Image (cartoon, rainbow, N blue to C red):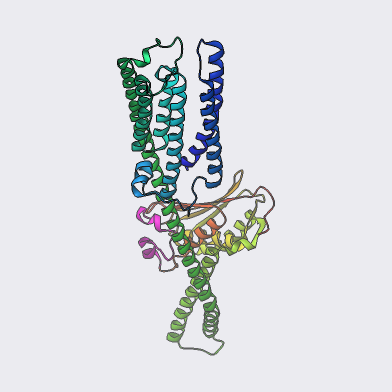
Amino acid sequence: MELIDRISWLIRLRWLAVVGVVATVETARRIFPVHLALAPIYAVVAAIAAYNLVLTWLARRLRPFPAGSELRLSGIVAQILTPRALRGMEGEREAARAALFVAAQIGLDLGALALLVHFAGGLENPFIFFFIFHTVISSIILSRRATYLQATLAFLLLSLIGVGECTGILTHYPLDGVWRPDAHADPLLVGAQLLVLGITLYLAAFMGSTIAAHMRERERHGALLAAEVARKARLLEETYERLAELEKAKSQYMRKVSHELRGPLGTIETALKVVLAGTAGESPAAVNDLLGRAARRAGELAEMVEELRVLSRAREARLAAEMSEFDATELVTDVVAELREAAGRGGLELALDSPGEPVTICADLAGLRQVIDNLISNAIRYTPPGGRVEVILARTADSLRLEVRDTGIGIPAVDLPHVFEEFYRAPNARAHTTGGTGLGLAIVGAVVRQHGGTVNVESAAGEGTRVTVALPIPAGPCPDR
């Protein structure tokens, strides 16, 4: 792309050169005491304008050589012209073709510049150092070897002019007052001029190509790094999509299984309760004990099935269709009231600190109720008798903050990173009570994330736990999703 852009740049620069040559010639012949060969000079200028028109036409239609062009470059030509940093990169063939197009333009320009110098004083022309500009341009655009070849071409053309005029093979067009009349025929003076010009050309080629090669190498590393990052980003995106599909399939499977199990489990639990109540007749104490255990296990299984249903529902982002506005203060108060009896049975104090005024929030009512219920139930379950569970509800400028604190058994530091994993229970939690499914905090995390909120757990073994949930409060009305 750089080579292609530089083609258009060279063409525009050449139009400026045509105008500059005409302006310089007209100024010089009117102000300075020089006699110029105007006819051949303007013929060269016309030739420059003519071939620049052709180059403009080619550049606009070929850009400069599209993929599939009939032009084929040999490997040697491509290696000579193309900068080393572009080799092996995508579009290398197009870059080689563009480099050939640029090299041809510079060669034409050097030839035209040599003719202008010849018809305007030869080596005594003060603008002879303009040959250096093309060497610098070559170093910026082409390879190092191509730059030295262009510098060699420039030196050969200058040598042809100098030696040709010195020996009389070429006609000398003097610039009166610049050199002495016979200076162009002095081999020592011509040789010294050519030596200085040659050294200048090759120094310019060396310095320009070295700097350009260093910059291209850095650009190459940057391009390769960008390509590698893009490749890994695509791979990561594909992996993420596969994981998302697997997660969705897992959630759908969980939801389907929990839905299919709810009915049979409900029937089993109801039948067991009916038998335990004596509706179907009195049963021996041993049978009642077995039936009681079965009923409790059925209840635990039903609780797990319901939690699996809620978790799968949250992971599939189905709650977005049930967003509504409601009073969060009233919801928290209701849940605390429902669980106060359970806290009392465990010998715990359950306290609520809320604003006392309505706090309207846009959320899924069932999902948020599940979050509050799970957090308080967990605190009650893992707090020994005589402890305290405190629920704090507060509103900030743009969010609802719910905090549940307890003086319970706490969570060891090694287990904190895993508390939101499904079915995970810390060893001290399993030792404290056999109840619990390990899905409570997983549901909390899934529902909170689905609402765009955050949840944070602070705890230490034997020092209680504090869970903080922050949910955003929309500035406007509840969106209809």
Q: Was residue 415 drawn as part of the magenta stretch in this picture?
A: yes
Asked where in the image residue 213 lies, by quadrant, the reply is: top left
Residue furthest front in the image = 169
Above-or-below relation of 453 to 423: above
Q: Does residue 403 show up?
A: no
Q: Nearer the viewer, residue 242 or 141?
A: 141
Vertical relation: 140 (above or below) 331: above
- 189 vs 419, left or right, is left
* Relative height, residue 103 to residue 73 (above, below): above
Residue at 34% in and 23% down: 163
- Relative depth, front residue between 321 and 271: 321
Rendered position, 207 above or below 295: above
Q: Which segment is the magenta one?
A: 409-433
Q: In the orientation shown, which residue stands out farthest toward the bottom?
A: 281
| Residue at the outermost right position | 477
Residue 230 position, x and y percent, is 44, 51
Q: Residue at x 62, y 50 (%)?
A: 473
Q: Position of residue 245 (x, y in %)?
A: 49, 66
Can residue 302 be seen from the camera position used here?
Answer: yes
Q: Quadrant of the C terminus?
A: bottom right
Q: Could you tell whether 61 is left or right of 324 in the image?
A: left
Q: How many marks?
A: 0
Look at 44% across and 46% down and name the residue there: 97
Residue 205 on the magenta segment? no
**Foreground residue, 234 or 290?**
234
Which residue is found at the position 52% from the left and 63% from the top?
Answer: 315
Give the percent coordinates (x, y) of residue 250: 48, 69
Q: What percent of the width, then of the height, locates residue 122? A: 42, 20
